[in-house]
Image (tube, grey):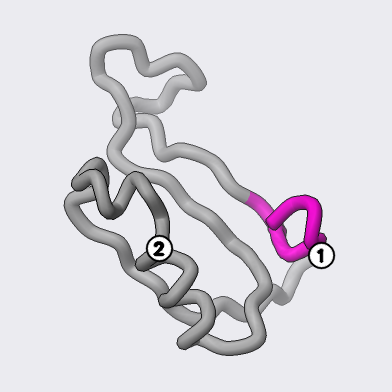
Amino acid sequence: MKAEARLVLAGPHPAVDSSDPGSAGFSGSLIVAEFDSLEAAKAWADADPYRAAGVYAEVVVKPFKQVFP
């Protein structure tokens, strides 16, 4: 996505308020990217190898409207 200039931002959600949560780990992650449609975004998420491997308990894909900056 980065090479295609579709990635807006991405990163993990630390389970505690720290850039290095240690043994607390992470509670999830966030990806904001540009797709032609919500269906295209869902198809991309469905094809994620981590999802196929069962790494993620849940994946939520929903619209986002950037207001700032």
Q: Which residues are magenta?
A: 1-9
- Is residue 53 shown above or below 20? below
Please identify the quarter of the rendering in which residue 34 is found. bottom right
x and y percentages locating residue 17 in the rendered image = 40, 26
Depth check: give the residue in front, 43 or 10.
43
Q: Amino acid at mark 2?
A: Ala
Query: Mark 1 = which residue?
Result: 69
Q: Amino acid at mark 1?
A: Pro
Instruction: Tell me the crowding category of disc 1: few under 14, some 14 to 19, or many 20 or more residues within 10 angstroms, Cα based.
Output: few
Q: Residue at x 48, y 68 (%)?
A: 44
- Determine the secondary structure under disc 1: loop
| Mark 2, secondary structure of its residue | loop
**Mark carried by residue 47:** 2
Q: Residue at x 74, y 52 (%)?
A: 2
Is 21 rendered above or below residue 15? above
Q: Position of residue 53 (x, y in %)?
A: 24, 45
Residue 34 located left or right of residue 3 = left
Percent across and percent down for residue 58 are: 22, 58
Q: For residue 6: magenta?
A: yes
Residue 1 tag number? none
